[in-house]
Amino acid sequence: MAPVPDTDRRSVVLGLAVAAAFALTVVGSNIPGPILPLYEDRLDMSPFVLAALFVTYFAALISMFLLMNRTALGRHAHVVLPVALLVGISGDVFLWLGSETPPLLFLGRVLTGTCVGLATGSAAALAVAARGESGRTLAATGAIGGSLIGLVAASVIAEVFGDPTVLIYRVHAVALAVCELILLTVLWCNRSRIRAAVGLAAPVPSSRPVRSSGRGARSGGRAAAYGLGAAGWTVGGIAVGVLPPALRDGLKSDLLVMGVLGGVVLLITAWGVPYIGRAVGRTPSAPHSLLLLGSGSAILAVGMVSGRLLPVLVGCLLWGIGQGFAYAKGLTLLTAGLMPVEQGKATSLYACTSYGFAALMILLAGALSCWVGYTWGTAIAVLLFGVFCGAVMLFGRKHWNTGDTDRAPAVLTVDH
């Protein structure tokens, strides 16, 4: 067997280090999900305040996405990603200090959002620099994987150990610190590769002919891609930010783990099913993914109203199947063929719209829960989300026809 070139080994290590760093930053975004009921009980927070706490980090997150999209920070991804990890550690510190002081919790969530926002675009650029085309789905797989790790780790620590509102953040801070040291070492060893990759990102005139369909078709295609991403990512936000207190209330259970079962089912499915689909050579199309998300919404709403766990888990299972493909397909549709820095910018804007819509749905569910209670508030919000999925499927029907999807990315990325 021929020896593996040292440059290939370095690129693999760089890709792994970047993926691990990004996943660990996303872990922090979902840590509060399982312990939201503890905040409700100990700090007397209402459903809307809990929802606001969960999505507070979206404000900073979206700000960072826009900053990465509109500036040249992507050319300094090798600096931005390590800085993001340091910001994440600071967020953990404020979150554990805020276990008895709500204002510090909100500040910690802002820092967590800043961390994830900086990491998303910079990690995407570095992943493409390290692995080429195979690195383009890092933002999708890393976000889902990190969300799953955060949800499971927080729920296990909350059930097994004492003082979970402090311990889980300390564990995460230590993990980020270790990852920071490894990442800095790997980035230094790959500095020449990274400089060469971002140098390729300078804009060059394109000789590709423009389709005669005009500006409207390009805008419509982008809107369809963004809608697909929003639909795919919002189910994760609902499962992690809305279902934990709602499920515990509906099932009359004191176990924190009961609240996160739906989220665990969704994220495991979303992470694993795409690999299975590629292995068997069959994956659902964009409209099929949206159909799965809409159907899951209807079944989950029935489970909430009837107070039965099984329909809720079935709905989350369908959500998971649809999410894994919807988010990744939307991202691929929008970014295929981009250079590393442009990949980072487009990924940031794509994530901005996805997280922004998720935040609106979570806040809507919190407001409805204050008005009509957790059961009906969550059920109504989920049904409205199902209607949104149907609307996206109808609006984008001409953009994910066979053949059109393959050509779309070259047109969708003109303005990025």
Image (cartoon, helix red, strand yellow):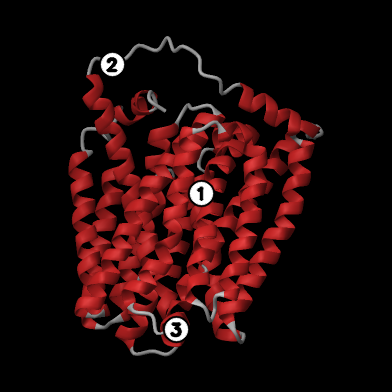
User: Which amino acid does the dot numbered 1 rest on?
Assistant: Gly
- Above or below: residue 412 compared with residue 233: above
> Disc 1 versus disc 2: distance between alpha carbons?
34 Å
**Callout 1: SS:** helix
> Which residue is rendered at x = 45% and y = 80% of the image?
39
Say left or right for 80 vs 121.
Answer: right
Residue 58 showing in the rendered view: yes
Q: Residue at x 56, y 79 (%)?
A: 165
Q: Position of residue 131 (x, y in %)?
A: 62, 35
Label 3 packing within 10 angstroms: few (<14), some (14-19), many (20+): few
Answer left or right for 384 relative to 8: left
**What amino acid is labelled 3 in the image?**
Leu
Q: Of helix, strand and loop, which one carries label 3? A: helix
Q: Which residue is mark 2?
A: 211
Q: Residue furthest top?
A: 207
Q: Which residue is denoted by mark 1 in the rendering?
A: 117
Q: Nearer the viewer, residue 317 or 166?
A: 166
- x, y (%) of residue 34? 47, 75
* Residue holding disc 3: 43
In terms of sequence position, does the residue under pointer 2 or pointer 3 come before the other? 3
Residue situated in front as seen by the camera: 212 or 1: 212
Q: Position of residue 320 (x, y in %)?
A: 38, 60
Indicate the secondary structure of the residue bearing disc 2. loop
Where does residue 219 sit, x and y in percent of width and height? Answer: 27, 30
Tag nearer the camera, 2 or 3:
3
Q: Which tag, 1 or 2, sits closer to the chain's start?
A: 1
- Label 2 crowding class (10 Å Cα cut-off): few <14, some 14-19, many 20+? few
Question: Would you say 307 lies left or right of 6 here?
Answer: left
Which label is found at residue 41? none
